[in-house]
Amino acid sequence: MHKMPRVKLDPSESVLAVIDIQPVLTKTIEDADRVLQRSAFLLQIARLLEIPVLTTEQNPSRMGATHENLAEWVQDPSPFSKMTFSAVGSPEFLSALKATGRNKVVIVGMETHICVCHTACDLLDLGYEVVVCPDAVSSRNMERHKLGMERIRDAGAVPAHTESVAYEWLGSAENPAFKSALAIVKQFA
């Protein structure tokens, strides 16, 4: 049996990558409201814990900017415009990721079987440890989402729920940010 890699998420080693959550895409994505809600949740936790957020936009002149529900949480130097399906194909994204000096990338976004999957696989090829949040990614239908998550997992990325990621970043109820994080958890319950 194939043993899954173990990724231990530490906030000082993590980056949150928000892949192509744009209005044109959300209109066609299965359960887009869930993706928006769970992505907003993790974006707020990342901001609270000072985890860098790198956001991409696929062909923004045609697909629009990052969805308005998430725009307030996007951090400089993002968003990165891209034409490649993998975020790694954007020299600006890759440069910003390398500049963080961090080796663990948590991914949310659209679409699971295309841009999310290609980004996860390319990051793994570059030696990053990758976690993809199935509750904060989706495709135009559940079959594509499921197949995308299977390929992502088979490639060596680890699936984890956004709430699991948040608690792993916190580490303990004694974390000074715990009470503020708990308020965010309750807000999105």
Image (cartoon, rainbow, N blue to C red):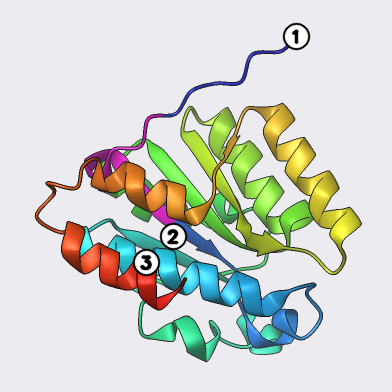
Q: Earlier along the polypeptide chain: callout 1 or callout 2?
A: 1
Question: Do callouts 3 and 1 mark residues in contact (Cβ within 8 Å)?
Answer: no
Q: CA distance from mark 2 to mark 3?
A: 32 Å
Q: Quadrant of residue 184?
A: bottom left
Return the residue at label 2.
Answer: 92
Question: Which amino acid lies under the numbered mark 1 shown in the image of this protein?
Answer: Met
Mark 2 or 3: the one toward you? 3
Which of pointers 2 and 3 lies earlier in the amino acid sequence?
2
* Residue 163 percent coordinates (x, y): 45, 55
Measured from the top left, where is residue 153 in percent x and y?
Answer: 69, 33
Side of 45 where 117 appears, left or right = right
Magenta stretch, residue numbers? 8-16
Amino acid type, label 2: Glu
User: How far is mark 3 from mark 1, CA to CA?
Assistant: 35 Å
Does residue 131 appear in the picture of this structure?
yes
Disc nearer the start of the sequence (3/1): 1
Q: What is the secondary structure assignment of the residue under circle 1?
A: loop
Residue 11, horizontal then vertical, whole percent: 26, 45
Residue visible at 54% across and 38% down in the picture: 123
Q: Which mark is residue 185?
A: 3
